[in-house]
Image (cartoon, rainbow, N blue to C red):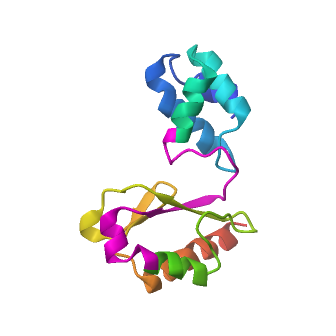
Amino acid sequence: MDRQSIIKQFEPVKDNLLNILHALQNSNPENYLSVDDLKLVSHYLNITYSSVYGVVKYYSMFSLKPRGKYVIRICKSPMCHMIGNKEIIDGLKETGYKLGETSGDKLFSVEETECLGRCAKAPALMINDKTYTALDRKKLKELIQSIKLNEQNTK
């Protein structure tokens, strides 16, 4: 579906800004919003480009640079930090994925994000729209391996 068709699914009111941005980003195989996307949304909603840009920069769920097919967001809340997000970050490094980077095969991007609201089952991370809790290195490696295997089977 092209970008025009995506945004026309929404009424052109400011209340739809976040939904439109998510829909555009989710339709992009590189998982990000381009300058052209922001201009399009600005024009469609009749708001300034800087307003759209400000929203995109404020929310960590949006990106202005290309990312992998799977975006791994590691919770950096104080609770996750105390309970073991460093172990998760180290476990990702062991599997070849580093914080702030996209893998060479464009399969994974690793980012930190604010609280995911899963403090009772910390540490937590999110991969695209799904949250995983009570993680340790073993569970993390199994999760990454499962995604990779699924990708190989769908090719």
Residue 145, by quadrant, is bottom right
Q: Position of residue 27 (x, y in %)?
A: 64, 42
Image height of 140 relative to 125, above or below: below
Check the picture and name the quadrant holding the N terminus.
top right
User: Residue sitting at 57 percent across and 28 percent down?
Assistant: 52
Q: Can residue 2 be seen at all in this image of the molecule?
A: no
Q: Position of residue 18 (x, y in %)?
A: 48, 33
Residue 130, by quadrant, is bottom left
User: Residue sitting at 68 percent across and 44 percent down?
Assistant: 28
The part of the chain drawn in magenta is 58-86
Q: Position of residue 118 (x, y in %)?
A: 30, 62
Image height of 23 relative to 138, above or below: above
Q: Position of residue 82 (x, y in %)?
A: 32, 74
- 34 and 90: which one is in front? 90
Q: Is residue 80 magenta?
A: yes
Q: Is residue 137 magenta?
A: no
In the displayed orientation, state which residue is furthest to the top.
46
User: Residue sitting at 67 percent across and 24 percent down?
Assistant: 40
Q: Can residue 71 be seen at all in this image of the molecule?
A: yes
